[in-house]
Amino acid sequence: MRGDGPAAQGRAGAAAAAMGAARATTRASLVARGMRHAEALLVYVVLVAVAITTIYPFVWTVVTSFESTGAVFQFPPPLWPRQPTLRNYRTVVETVPLLRYLLNSVVITAGGVLGSLVVAALAGYPLAKLRFAGRNLVFGAIVATLILPNEAGLIVNYITTIKLGLLHTGAGQYAAVVLPSLASTVGIFLMRQAYLAVPDELLEAARVDGATELGIWWRIMVPLAAPSVAAFAILQFVAFWNSFLWPIIVLTDKSYYPLASGLLDLQGQFATNTRAIASGTVIAMVPILAVFVAGQRFFMRGLEGAVKQ
């Protein structure tokens, strides 16, 4: 019995130490879980704030376009029109040549998207798959142009369009709007990243079979980079459809204005019909929303492919 005393005390001490360790582990687990929940809550709060900030201008524009009376810039802003009316949309139709401006937007957007896709898809191929001296330097120089503001090229582009004689010809005025935006740095970057995901062995096999570089680009690279092509097409569609400043600068004939620029007709010298402008903006946004909803799946796949590289 004398020998059991220290042994029993030892077992009791070990049991107490084990219980203490278990309680400490439980507390640490609870603290870690609480921190994860707090971190997730903070992320949700930030995302909700960003979503509200992003969506609010769109909601305000739609509500204002259907408002008939009341202050436009009141606080807090209404989330629903108090007396919904289509009068503002009728004002847009009666004030501006809406069909003409829509046709101009379609021509400019179609030509711009098609041309910029060809330029970006062709430029991205040698930067991704061909070996030549200074390739990375050329790509770095192209990417470095992202830091330049768009306004930096206005004077150069305007002089170029004058030298090309595009400002005083019918169809040439469409070209004057489209040409300066055909070479897109973002598009070249997206296409290069998409091409890098294509195995080099596939290209070597095609070269062994006698395919030319242009044939490899058209028959292999472009189909495999289809999600990035679709994503870039959506980005360019939005950019050309919303063309505003450059058409006003370069076009001498207002009948060639795209819709975004043509909405300036709703603004007088001494007064601005904000509700009519909001209605015109909603009309201009409808095609963009339709294209984005239709191509959303390709848009996300294209951007994911570019980010993973």
Image: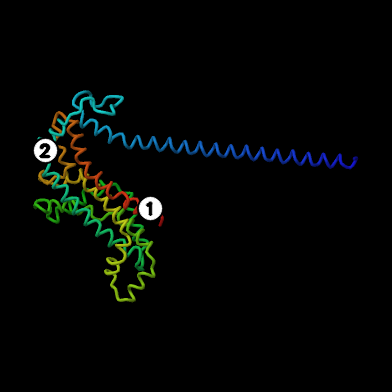
Q: Residue furthest right?
A: 2
Residue positioned 61% across, 39% down in the render: 28
What residue sits right under mark 2 in the picture?
Answer: 96
Residue positioned 24% across, 31% down in the render: 63
Depth check: 140 or 6 in front?
A: 6
Q: List x then y, in percent, for residue 203.
A: 35, 70
Identify which amino acid the numbered label 2 is placed on: Val
- Please rate how many residues cluster around mark 1, counting C-alpha atoms within 10 Å: few if below 14, some from 14 to 19, many from 20: some
Location of residue 20 (image quadrant): top right
What residue sits right under mark 1 in the picture?
Answer: 304
Label tally: 2
Residue positioned 39% across, 35% down in the render: 49
Q: Secondary structure beneath disc 1?
A: helix
Identify which amino acid the numbered label 1 is placed on: Glu
Q: Residue furthest top?
A: 70
Q: Secondary structure beneath disc 2?
A: loop
Q: Nearer the viewer, mark 2 or mark 1?
A: 1
- N-terminal-most mark, 2 or 1: 2
